[in-house]
Amino acid sequence: MRGCSQSRGAIMTTDLIIIGAANPLIIRVIDDINAESGNKFNVLGFVDNNWMNIGKEKWGITVFPGFDSLSDFDRTNTKLINAIAGSMKTRKETTAFFIERGWSFANIFHPRINLKY
């Protein structure tokens, strides 16, 4: 099985697969987290059902061919992020699809977000 979270001293590394490959914003946020946080995300790839993206690289990251391609990954140690932004209905249905199959999702937020209020 592919995917493994590892603890390296005080740093926890989490393997991550991003659902949806249409927007680089999520990569920027993950890059900032990795640069400024004690925890790190190792992006294994995108998963996308858009045939125009499959098998290509987006922003230097592999796009896996559809949801079924994730069956080889370790669901215990690999987390997902849903970056689908075009349709909230599709986003919700996709999240439910993966939860029903035993996947869990990582929560990420920008390290410089203002949480004062």
Image: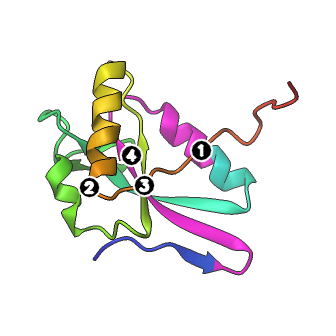
Question: Looking at the picture, which amino acid does disc 4 mark?
Answer: Ile
Q: List the residue tagged with mark 3.
A: 104
Evaluate if marks 1 and 3 touch, with contact meaning CB atoms under 8 Å apart. Answer: no
Q: Residue at x 26, y 55 (%)?
A: 101
Left or right for 9, reference 74 = right
Evaluate if marks 2 and 1 touch, with contact meaning CB atoms under 8 Å apart. Answer: no
Q: Residue at x 34, y 53 (%)?
A: 45
Question: Looking at the picture, which amino acid does disc 2 mark?
Answer: Arg
Q: Residue 14: x percent and y percent?
A: 53, 64
Q: Secondary structure at mark 4?
A: strand
Q: Which residues are magenta?
A: 8-31
Q: Residue 28: x percent and y percent?
A: 56, 38
Q: List the residue tagged with mark 4.
A: 18
Q: Secondary structure at mark 2?
A: loop
Left or right for 52, reference 4 = left
The tag earlier along the polypeptide, 4 or 2, is: 4
**Within 10 Å of the Cα at label 1, are there few (<14), some (14-19), or many (20+) other Cα atoms?**
few
